[in-house]
Amino acid sequence: MIPRYSRPEMVAIWSPETKFKIWYEIEAHACEAMADMGTIPRENADAVWKAKDVEFDVARIDEIEAVTKHDVIAFLTHLAEHVGADEARFVHQGMTSSDVLDTCFNVQLVRAADILIAGVEGLMGALKRRAIEHKDTLRVGRSHGIHAEPTTMGLTFARFYAEMDRNLARMHTARAEIATGAISGAVGTFANVDPQVEDHVCAALGLKPEPISTQVIPRDRHAAFFAALGVVSSSIENIAIEVRHMQRTEVLEGAEFFSMGQKGSSAMPHKKNPVLTENLTGLARLVRMTVIPALENVALWHERDISHSSVERNIGPDATITLDFALARMTSVIDKMIIFPQNMLDNMNKFPGLVMSQRVLLALTQAGVSREDAYSMVQRNALKVWEHRTDFREELLADEDVCKALSVDEINEKFDMGYHTKHVDTIFARVFGDV
């Protein structure tokens, strides 16, 4: 990803320097296990650890690869330049390139998952804080973009929190599923490398041995991982869309923070555009773009081909770096978001009392009116409000059929806002527990 949408900690996971360091650790731990088993001389295994503080020369490895046309061989050649050719002669014994590549890739994905999990938790913290702050801040709920019934801004934040809580569970599952390694040799039979080597390497790197790896770690694990990232990105977009809607001029119930000196438009100085959340919608598309290729990587020829390799070299960094940036940006948006409670009330009252239509409908049916007749009585009065911006309660009080079924006090009682917020505490308890 370009630096504009990147954060240093996640970028570092995917640097060539980090990759080669992990490759080295895999090889060194494998030699250590072989020495423990008596497969190779102890002094050769110890010699490999002489390179533990070496900063591998990326340019030199690239130079060797230009000749060998093989990245792992290029690295092993460079490692021998540090350790000594004779001392390094047992490095990679019985192993195949996928042992190194796949195990390293999963180490990188696990490290990336840890950062992403922290990012989800950070966003959840911001959502919870704003939910509690606006638990009782009334706003109109909308379905199909049209005023429906009253809700609260706190419930809006709370539902996004609950969605991110589910995403947190998905990320923990994805991390656990991807945290496997394989040191099983050609076609995965352990013919030339003992399974104990795999056990030792995986334990040292915080992984579990892959139960059966052919010559590669099964890619259904990776498909599930990137699918989880895609769901998280869609949830980010879900929040971003709500913020973008709230910031529309004719709505203006909430808005991104607009900093001193910020400019909204090169042409129109009055503009305050929701550029951060628009950006997040775009970034979500980029993350989701990696899901289909990850799914297509599951089907490989026989015990292994490398049709997945070029895909993963791109989507691994791109998806995790982009999602990490998006989580941080979304958290900042929620933290700094400006809420306009009065505008929420003003919007709800643009068609005075109309959002109480269902209460009146239910009251009429409870008073003995058939549902069909009750619906017709409520709707004809509601349409007057739509067309003439009159007051819904006044229209009902002037309707003889309605007044035959309901008293004035019964009609007036149906316009109590507290009716719609009476279970907010119950919902909050379900989402947050005791707050």
Image (cartoon, rainbow, N blue to C red):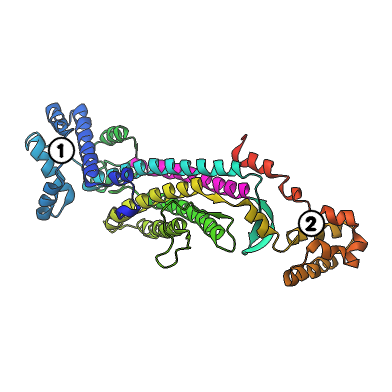
Q: Mark 1 points at which residue?
A: 91
- Badge 1 element: loop
Residue 83, position in %: x, y?
10, 35
Work out whether residue 250 or residue 329 is closer to the camera in this orientation and state it: 250
Q: Are the residues flagged by discs 2 and 1 in contact, CB closer than 8 Å?
A: no
Q: Is residue 219 something that shows in the picture?
A: no
Determine whether the residue tagged by mark 2 lies in a helix, strand or loop: helix
**Comes first in the chain, label 2 or label 1:** 1
* Residue 2 seen from this side: yes
Q: Tell me if residue 68 comes above or below residue 25 in the rendering.
A: below
Which is more toward the observer, 192 or 174?
174
Q: Identify the disc placed on residue 349.
A: none
In percent of width and height, residue 338 lies at 54, 50
Where's residue 244, x and y in %?
Answer: 52, 59
Disc 1: CA contacts within 10 A as few (<14), some (14-19) or many (>=20): many
Alpha carbons under labels 2 and 1: distance apart: 76 Å
Quadrant of the image occupied by residue 206: top left
Residue drawn 22% across the image and 39% down it: 21
Q: In this view, does 157 lie to the left or right of 312?
A: right
Query: Residue 365: where, in percent of width, then height?
Result: 85, 59
Give the number of the mark in front: 2 or 1.
2
Q: Residue at x 59, y 64 (%)?
A: 250
Position of residue 293 relative to residue 112, above or below, is below
Which residue in the structure is indicated by mark 2?
A: 359
Left or right, residue 285 beside residue 385: left
Please state the extent of the stretch shown in magenta in the rendering: 153-180
Q: Residue furthest right?
A: 404
- In the rendered image, the quadrant that contains the N terminus is bottom left
| Amino acid, disc 1 | Val
